[in-house]
Amino acid sequence: MNQSSISVALIRPLIEAAGNQKFNPETDNQQFLETRLNKVLKDPDARISRQDADLLINKIVSNSNRNSLCVFSSEKAASQSSCQLQHLFLCSNTLREALYYLEKYSTLLCDGLEINITRTRDDIIKVKFPVNEQSYLSQERYRTELLIGTILSWIKQLCGQEMKINGIDLPFPQPSYANEYSNSWKSTTNFNSEECSIQFESKYLDQGLHNTNPHILNMIKRDVEEQFKKLTRSGSLADRIKRALNQDKISLKANQQVVAEHFHISARTLNRHLQKENTSLKQIVTECRIQKAKVLLESNMSIEQIAQQLGLSGRRTLDRIFIKHTQVSPAQYRARAHNNQREDRNNSQMQNVRMAYA
């Protein structure tokens, strides 16, 4: 989450929860407040950069003298976000359908956001959010609170306030205002977790909620799809393809048509955008294969097995591609990597010996 952007839908509830704040023109960036804040209030489907979003969030929280404001703002999310994705979510006839749209179009909330819906053996549904390595930082925590609170409010508005949330896992340490989580989110919250997720029983998935007019639902769906297409085309398509390949969402053997369908564009449009970015699908796939090969060559897998895992016909093909791009063969790269590892271990041992005699 090129510089990533965030949907205004995540920030509007925070502004509403903060009320009419009085900003100090001597310490605040007045131009920023006039341009960004006004845009936030007017258009729930607008986007601002993550840097500007963090500046705005931190300023609002600081001026409110309430560190838990991002948690508390979830109570305003259902009425204040009002973005097209929210409309599609709330017009769904079942929670299963709503979660499908949320998973498919999650990047409309934040660039790079990948929401995954999973089911455990105990029939618990998990709405899982990506975990950032710097989740302990306050700005990461604030954004996570806004995201979790927003999705919770959508789920509650769709299924009713009586719906029980079994638990919420958060990847950061317990803050001083931990009691605000249970008060606002009505669920048990676990901190320092390895994942970030909302959990509830699967029985809620297919309960009949309402019967939305299919014409209205299709109209909203078309609007969301159009937004998604514009967002996909506005950023670096090459970077998005690389991310999808690295996350195994697209096979390394996928052809142009399959890749284009993944991004909801035509093969012709895909080629046109990649040409503007001075690259091609073949070049992107090759770069991903080389990077993955370098990692796998430090494992115990045979070079033939690595070639097959990378979607290549065999070792000879991997040798040819690898030598062309690195000027060494996979076997030579593996030997050098192992030598470097041995040298690092030896240097570490020598350093320990010196420290012992110091």
Image: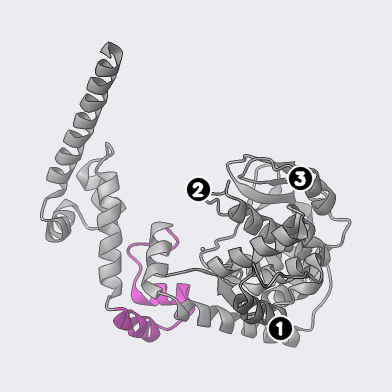
Amino acid at the residue labelled 2: Glu
Crowding near pointer 3: few (<14 within 10 Å), some, many (20+)? few
Answer whether labels 2 and 3 touch (C-beta < 8 Å). no
Q: Is residue 340 left or right of residue 249?
A: left
Closer to the eye: label 2 or 3? 3
Against 27, is 349 above or below? Answer: above
Q: Residue at x 72, y 72 (%)?
A: 12
Q: Total number of numbered labels?
A: 3
Answer whether labels 1 and 3 touch (C-beta < 8 Å). no
Which residue is denoted by mark 2 in the rendering? 133
Q: Which mark is residue 184?
A: none
Q: Residue at x 76, y 55 (%)?
A: 65
Which residue is denoted by mark 1 in the rendering? 42
Percent from the top left, x then y, of residue 163? 84, 55
Which SS class for mark 1?
helix
Residue 207 shows in this picture:
no
Whether residue 259 appears in magenta in the rendering, the answer is yes
Q: Which mark is residue 177?
A: 3
Against 185, is 279 above or below? Answer: below
Residue 47 shows in this picture:
yes
Which SS class for mark 3?
loop
Q: Is residue 113 left or right of residue 16?
A: left
Percent from the top left, x then y, of residue 58? 65, 60
Whether residue 155 appears in magenta in the rendering, the answer is no
Amino acid at the residue labelled 1: Lys
Crowding near pointer 2: few (<14 within 10 Å), some, many (20+)? few
